[in-house]
Image (tube, grey):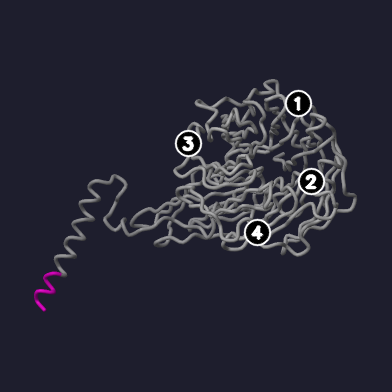
Amino acid sequence: MRIARLRDKTVIARLIMFGFVACLNLLSCKSWGKFWLTEIVYPTSPLIVTQYVTMSPVTPAMPGSAETCAVTPALPEGLSLAKDCTISGTPTRGQGTLPYRITANIGSDTVSGTLYVRVLYQPRFMYTANIGTNNISAFSINSGGALTFLANYNAGNACRFVVVHPGGRFLYTANHGSGNISILEIDQTNGALTTLVASPVATQVNPYSLAFDPQGRFLFVGHENTGVAAISAYAVDTTSGQLTLVSGSPFAAAAGASPASVHVDFTGKFLYAGSTQNSPQPNSFAYTINQNTGALAQISGSPFGTIQDAIAVYVHPSGKFVYYAQYFSPTGVVSYIRDMSTGSLSLMNGSPFQAGLAPGFVTGDPHGRFVYVANSGDTSLAAGVSGFQVGADGALVAMPGSPYASGLNPIGFAIDETSRYAYAANQASGNVTAYTVDASTGALSVIAGSPFATGTNPTTIAIAGSNP
């Protein structure tokens, strides 16, 4: 008995000494008890709230009770931080997913945590890239999701992809035929576009798709060209919208690849690309993004799997899953489980999940409940869009009523950030089909007045809000 007690005292003494010695070597350690504290953890990260909609207050878990709480940088306009670190309010400005460092004083010590916050825009304007007429069609969106044509704006040759900067002020197009990027400023009041003096910006040949990191610091360009076999990267001036080529760009994929499709995860730390090759070779690529420069580096194990033409890629808002549209047979959605720390991919059970003919664009709602695919080979007018509900494990289950009617050969698809409306770009019809989205199931219903005429051969769609 006495020997056991002595042994226990020795163990305790060693633990105390370990804490004391470790603290001597860590400037951030204020007490040896610090080693048993954990970070502040909010119920969800990213925290997704909606412009002009009062959010339900969220309170984090932490080891103790907060006496005071601080955040860096300041929370989005309209949100406030209570002394117990509860976040509440009504956000007034939309934004991409940005990181915030929350620090609480719990009396004997401090504890911190990083929370990502995204403010969803209310939909106001919609834009289509028209590859046949080298222009952009602009529309306003009314309270029921219907469209009113505003004007057409010139872009480059074979303008095929359009995207709005996370800040909401600028619109960018990938001009497949002229090998450049057009930059236009969006009038936040009426949706009109003005081409910047610095536009267009030269890039590698055959730019096919564009993707921003959620903070809008960097723009990435996928190229449908095996000679390029790389992804271009640009730093973005968020005040002027201008682009500066990142040192080392373009960043190689693999010899003979055409990494046309690109998408960035919600942390802005990883980029995923798909090659449009249909030969039996790995073509799902993954990169880390240098947070200071925007430079790309392929992660260990990339590329991860063979896809029969990975024409589009979509990273789930949780960051847990990555979905590729597989254009050739077996047509569908090739799905991966993603390692949140390393970014590596593992093929999901049940993949690929069946879609329609020649799946084009794949995307989903900001809350990660639904995934949609535009079936660009469909000419039936009855099966243009496949809709899926997302399971907890990332598996896709067809929605009630899927596939849904559209125009001829729908290749582009977009859902507004509030998940009320969705739109399909019907390439062969030269128009857009508008839908309402069932909040419970994700099912689509065609809006009266559809389809809405665009320029010739619309390929992609971008929906914009505004920060007046």
Q: Residues within 10 Å of mark 1 (few under 14, many from 20)?
A: some
Instruction: Give the residue at the far right of this rendering.
Output: 449
Q: Is residue 183 magenta?
A: no
Which quadrant of the rendered structure holds the C terminus? top right
Q: Which residue is mark 4?
A: 369
C-alpha span from label 3 to label 4: 30 Å
C-alpha span from label 1 to label 4: 36 Å
> In this picture, is 210 found above or below 36?
above
Instruction: Determine which of the numbered discs, if any, sits on residue 297 in the image.
Output: 3
Instruction: Give the residue at the far top of this rendering.
Output: 197
Of the numbered discs 3 and 4, the one sitting upstream in the chain is 3
C-alpha span from label 3 to label 1: 31 Å
Looking at numbered disc 2 in the image, what kind of residue is underneath it?
A: Pro
Please report the bounds of the magenta region as a residue range: 1-7
> In this picture, is 209 found above or below 117?
above
Q: Residues within 10 Å of mark 3 (few under 14, many from 20)?
A: some
Of the numbered discs 2 and 1, the one sitting upstream in the chain is 1
Q: Which residue is mark 2?
A: 410
Looking at numbered disc 4 in the image, what kind of residue is underneath it?
A: Arg
C-alpha span from label 2 to label 4: 22 Å
Instruction: Give the residue at the far left of this rendering.
Output: 2
Q: Which residue is mark 1?
A: 157
Foreground disc of the pair 2, 4: 2
